[in-house]
Image: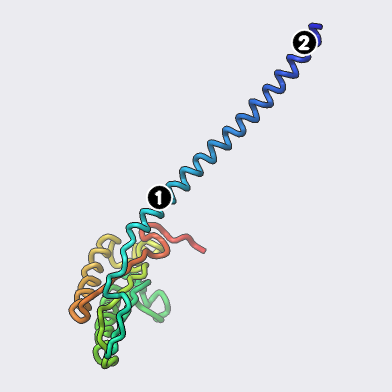
Amino acid sequence: MADRDDIIAEVLDDRVAEVRAERDRHKARADRLAVEVAELRRLLDLHDAVAAASPKPPRWLAPKKKSKGHVATPVLILSDLHLDEVVNPAEIQGLNAFNRDIAERRLRKAFDKTVELTRHYLAGVTYDGIVVCLGGDLLSGTLHDLAETNEDYLLSSALFWTEHISAGLEMLAGEFGNVYVPVVVGNHGRLTKKPRT
């Protein structure tokens, strides 16, 4: 009888060990799922916060009732300017050049030509304002190994170009009255190197 009890006890001990191991596997899985659920909740909360904080376009951009004259809203898109990047013509067989002076002239020309085009080439149109999209990658940053050749340090560049873009926006506000500036970030950070492909 004792042998039989020992065998039963051994079988029961084995089964208890199996059940405990299964319980531990399920508990580990439940812990992993709890972490995943917490991360999904965090992302959902972030999404909800961004959606709630997203600015709505100004009312003057809403479609108007038909009027006798032509009403329009011009759009200027400034994107991928890579301001303060330096391209040395000597390094590329003289095929191109880029630096702060060239970028300043190009930016000023973009603002000036926007006014010239709307004022002189699109006659008979009343403008209710202008939309200026800042589409990202405005500064070069430290993307490449040649970042040390940039015109200035990143934060100094940001301060320098903020003044120039602000001046252009103020000029457009003087011309069009209303200015709406939607902004998106670039396709990579400015303070880290872009991964090589």
| Amino acid type at image mark 2 | Asp
| CA gap, disc 1 and disc 2 | 58 Å
Query: Percent from the top left, x then y, of residue 173?
Result: 20, 76
Which sits in the foreground, 36 or 72?
Answer: 72
Q: Which mark is residue 17?
A: none
What residue sits right under mark 1 in the picture? 45
Residue 50 is drawn in which quadrant? bottom left
Query: Percent from the top left, x then y, of residue 2?
Result: 79, 6
Q: Secondary structure at mark 1?
A: helix
- Give above or below for 11 relative to 108: above
Residue 92 is drawn in which quadrant? bottom left
Left or right relative to 192: residue 29: right
Q: Crowdedness of circle 2 by 10 Å Cα count: few (<14), some, many (20+)?
A: few
Q: Earlier in the sequence, mark 1 or mark 2?
A: 2
Q: Which mark is residue 5?
A: 2
In the picture as drawn, the residue positioned furthest to the top comes out as 2
| Amino acid type at image mark 1 | Asp
Split into 4 quadrants, where in the image is the N terminus?
top right
Which sits in the foreground, 131 or 72?
Answer: 72
Q: Secondary structure at mark 2?
A: helix
